[in-house]
Amino acid sequence: MTTPDTSRQLGRFIAASGMTNLADGIAVVVWAWMATLLTRDPLLVALMPVALRMPWFLFALPAGIVTDRVDRRRLMLTMDILRACVFAVAALLVWSALPLGEPPENGTGVPVLFGALLMCALLVGTAEVFRDNAAQTMLPAIVPHAGLERANGRLWSVELVGNALIGPALGAFLIAFVIWMPFALNAAIFALAALMMLGLRGQFKPQQAGARDWRKELREGLGFLRAAPLLRLLAVVTGVWNLLHQMVVIALVLHVQENLGLGARGYGLILAAGAVGGILGGLIAERVIKRLGAGATAQWMTLASAVAFGAIVFAPNGWALALVLAMFELTGLIWNTVSVSYRQRVIPDALLGRVNSVYRLLAWGMMPVGLLLSGLIVSWSEALMPRGAALTMPFAAAGLGAALLTAVAWRSLGRGFSKA
């Protein structure tokens, strides 16, 4: 049963997460759009989000070990402060480089600024790895296990409001108005999120047994995942899906600009419209899972993503694209609710950080591959077809990949959840 104190603690935790996700939503537009102001080369544009996602491959395992050793609330607080400082530096860098010239087709217009922003993105991504890994281990310490689906639904709905509804639209407006402003605003938002985490009360440091040995601790996390077939399956499915998703996300930036003729504000509003579907998914996820069952829900949501990826190719304008993204975000949020709630429920608290990090290494470590693959697909396709058509090829490839993923995983997902 949820007590009034539990509700207050959950509310504070969700508010802090909402703030950080608002900043992340602003950054979704700003990092990629800033790259297009410095270069038109698809591979170089992809490097900026690669710098944000590469830390998941590099630091996911160390983050898990750290999360299971320290006070998780304090770790999240430290990472929010670090991101506030990095965004403040990025704002100063962009401001000092103004005015910017026309971006070249090859290379970058301001190499020093481009390189410095890549380093800032890498630091922000590294902080996100440690912060997000700790955040996913916090929820089971705040609410009872029976309330995880409802708590996760509320958490992700609030996060989506910031990350994909308000954040992208606000970031697009600000970068079109004053290009350094969204970086400065993010610095302030992360500082406020840190203040919210200061007021969170509870026991968030896992119990330690015996002397610390990071090799032994890592083996324990790997061993638990190795002995859990359904967790391994979910990690692999999520990893492949994230690879395909990142192919689509980075390809959208140039597709919206060159094929649909929209600016930063239009792009932000399209992402925001997609978030409406995600928010609805968060609100109905618990009921959908109860109605269909966890296995069937995971199966159908994976299939729906294949349809959504492929449909982007045929969306003739921003309105149609927004509708497709709304469907995609709705089904993706329901999938996440199934996957993460199961993970939080079955992994012991003392192992949660390590197992979670191994899981997310598989699931999130594929993101940089998807980003680079998207740029390569566009570059290769330009040799065979007009640029406009080439810019849609990552969507077609992602749709085909998601369809194959659904076919391969369908039976195992149903059987795995039935046994669970």
Image (spheres, rainbow, N blue to C red):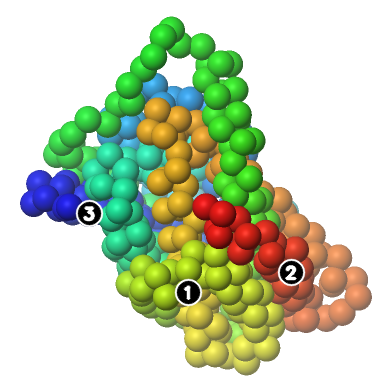
Q: Which residue is mark 2?
A: 407
Label 2 secondary element: helix
Which quadrant of the figure has residue 157? Answer: bottom left
Q: Does 139 sit left or right of 300 as displayed?
A: left
Q: Which residue shows up at 31% across the image and 48% down it? A: 145
Q: Which mark is residue 15?
A: 3
Q: Furthest-right residue in view?
A: 384
Q: Furthest-top residue in view?
A: 211
Marks 2 and 1, how far apart at CA: 19 Å
Disc 2 or 1, which lies upstream in sequence?
Answer: 1
| Crowd around label 3: few <14 · some 14–19 · many ≥20 (10 Å) | some
Which quadrant of the figure has residue 74? Answer: top left
Q: Which residue shows up at 40% across the image and 28% down it? A: 350
Which quadrant of the figure has residue 168? Answer: bottom left
| Crowd around label 2: few <14 · some 14–19 · many ≥20 (10 Å) | some
Residue type marked 1: Leu
Q: Give coordinates of residue 141: x percent, y percent.
A: 28, 39
Q: Which residue is mark 1?
A: 292
Residue type marked 2: Ala
